[in-house]
């Protein structure tokens, strides 16, 4: 049973007394709130067994190492990796994507090669490929986005050729909410021998993701968007691909043997984890995964479909409000970007804030997409497990206030 | 903590069985443990009947890594390559007879890692499969 009122009780930030208006948090696409279990797990590490991992021959270090590696297994099972060695801890999805661009990209992308991405990518899944292509003489092609917020699949098929080495695509747009036809993209990309990288920053927190069922090659995501702390991200890739990749960063913990003449690398996954990692954050992420598993990712997805259905219906009744992205809840996630007449999104956001409603205003790290739609900025409301239809109602009341003030 | 100084571990550490190298080795392999710098090299002589009739190891490291190597040498001597292949993590831990924490496990299994790689060409992920999840 998905009991939102009970879920809200688990989030201290949503239960602060004393403020004149309760917090209506509608910016989980930027960063989610954290349940008590995650906050306490990190606190307990610092209070009771703070020590470095993989080194100390003493009890608290072994306990820290054990907790760190247990989290890796939790994360691996969560996305159905084949084994825990395929889970690389990074700082965030952005670092995961840069790791692939520098390590795999430098070794595999040559002059004349093509990298395909889309017009609706977050900058993190766009700039690394532009930079890689510029370094190595390759070309980036962008799958166009239609007016309705879908990918132009005919254009994608026309781009496919043996020169395409990588297709890097979001599994859920952070602006339009669009869930692209990933199975189709993967099948067609593999047919020309290209690898497929999925930006899972939005999909992994909000829907079931099974890397073996998808048959993708890389998946990048962030901890802080899935109830975990900031400063921890994940790169998953197939073990044979990771084994063939050179290290991204070098230093301690990632080596097997070091001499003045040269060095050899540690086994997976530590080959890609140079230096002391974010130990508390990794442990916190493990507890976030536990929390999501308790709710069930299918239930979370259904909850968001329900709330998006209600939100689309209510927002459509607001005068002058224009929603970008798919209008059918089953084709989209919980991010709803919109404009309200010609009121600037910063004004919309500030007025909503005075009503206790937190939304995002700006280009949401997707400037090319906004340019395409002829917009400088949009306002974005996004939903997660702790949001209810009442939050949608408070948003709509705030938007009515915007219209009254600014019109 | 007393456990780590159990007599049989200290005995193997102080008086390692089959210490040294073989001049006519059919298999030679060396690995180190990057976490603490332990090194073990194992030499085997396998005869025409596929029997490991001579063994030797040479190493540097803590009591756990060196004693477990010495014990492993006794375990495989006189066995066929196929018989020795069946030796795994559990057999090593049983021979040591103490609780081993996750960090020291790397020390305890270093000699097995050398044997698996040197005699069978197996990487740790191939013989330590039960550790996948």
Image (cartoon, grey):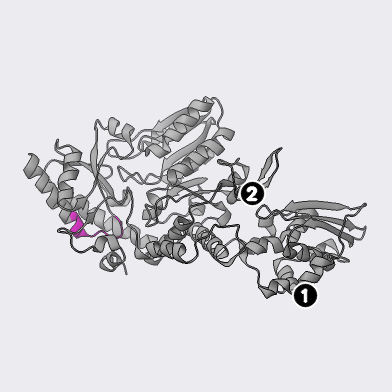
Q: Is residue A316 visible?
A: no
Segment colored magenta: A384-392
Q: Residue at x 47, y 30 (%)?
A: A131
Q: Residue at x 82, y 56 (%)?
A: B58
Secondary structure found at label 2: loop
Q: How many marks?
A: 2
Confirm whether the magenta stretch covers residue B35.
Answer: no
Quadrant of residue A36 within the rendered picture: bottom left
According to the image, label 1 marks what residue?
B7
Vertical placement of residue A113 versus A388, above or below: above
Q: Residue at x 62, y 46 (%)?
A: A243
Q: Residues within 10 Å of mark 2 (few under 14, many from 20)?
A: many
Quadrant of residue B52 within the rendered picture: bottom right
According to the image, label 2 marks what residue?
A266
- Screen quadrant of the C terminus of chain A: top left
Secondary structure found at label 1: helix
Q: CA distance from mark 2 to mark 1?
A: 34 Å
């Amino acid at each position: 049973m998905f009991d939102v009122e009970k879920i809200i009780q688990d989030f201290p930030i949503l239960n602060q007394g004393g403020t004149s208006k309760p917090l209506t948090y509608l910016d989980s696409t930027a960063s989610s709130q954290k349940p008590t279990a995650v906050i306490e797990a990190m606190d307990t590490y610092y209070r009771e067994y703070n020590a470095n991992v993989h080194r100390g021959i003493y009890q608290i270090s072994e306990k820290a190492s054990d907790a760190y590696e247990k989290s890796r297994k939790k994360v691996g099972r969560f996305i159905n990796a084949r084994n825990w060695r395929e889970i690389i801890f990074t700082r965030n999805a952005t670092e995961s994507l840069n790791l692939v661009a520098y390590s795999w990209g430098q070794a595999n992308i040559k002059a004349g090669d093509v990298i395909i991405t889309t017009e609706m990518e977050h900058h993190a899944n766009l700039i690394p490929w532009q930079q890689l292509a510029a370094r190595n003489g390759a070309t980036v092609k962008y799958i166009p986005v239609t007016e309705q917020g879908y990918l132009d699949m005919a254009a994608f098929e026309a781009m496919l050729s043996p020169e395409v080495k990588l297709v890097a695509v979001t599994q859920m747009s952070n602006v339009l909410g669009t869930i692209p036809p990933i199975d189709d993209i993967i099948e067609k990309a593999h047919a020309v021998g290209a690898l497929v990288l999925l930006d899972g920053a939005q999909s992994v927190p909000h829907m079931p993701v099974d890397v073996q069922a998808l048959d993708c090659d890389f998946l990048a995501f962030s901890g802080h968007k899935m109830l975990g702390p900031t400063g921890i991200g994940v790169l998953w890739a197939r073990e044979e691909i990771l084994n063939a990749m050179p290290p991204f960063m070098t230093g301690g913990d990632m080596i097997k043997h070091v001499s003045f003449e040269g060095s050899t690398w540690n086994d997976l996954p530590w080959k890609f984890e140079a230096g002391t990692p974010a130990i508390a954050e990794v442990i916190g992420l493990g507890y976030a995964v536990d929390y999501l598993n308790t709710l069930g990712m299918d239930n979370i997805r259904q909850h968001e479909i329900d709330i998006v259905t209600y939100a689309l219906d209510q927002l459509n009744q607001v005068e002058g409000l224009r929603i970008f992205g798919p209008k059918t809840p089953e084709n989209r996630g919980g991010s709803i970007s919109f404009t309200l007449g010609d009121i600037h999104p910063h004004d919309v956001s500030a007025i909503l804030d005075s009503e206790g409603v937190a939304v995002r205003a700006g280009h949401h790290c997707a400037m090319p997409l906004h340019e395409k739609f002829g917009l400088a900025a949009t306002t974005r409301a996004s939903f997660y497990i702790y949001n209810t239809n009442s939050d949608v109602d408070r948003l709509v009341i705030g938007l009515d206030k915007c219209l009254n003030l600014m019109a | 903590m007393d456990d780590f100084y159990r007599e049989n571990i200290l005995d193997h550490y102080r008086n390692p069985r089959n210490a040294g190298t073989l001049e006519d080795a059919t298999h030679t392999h060396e690995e180190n443990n990057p976490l603490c710098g332990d090194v073990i090299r194992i030499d085997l002589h396998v005869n025409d009947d596929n029997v490991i009739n001579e063994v030797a190891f040479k190493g540097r490291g803590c009591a756990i890594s060196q004693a477990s190597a010495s014990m492993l040498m006794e375990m495989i001597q006189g066995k066929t390559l196929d018989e020795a292949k069946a030796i795994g993590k559990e057999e090593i831990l049983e021979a040591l007879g103490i609780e081993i924490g996750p960090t020291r496990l790397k020390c305890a299994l270093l000699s097995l890692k050398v044997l698996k790689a040197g005699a069978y060409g197996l990487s740790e992920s191939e013989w330590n499969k039960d550790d996948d999840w």
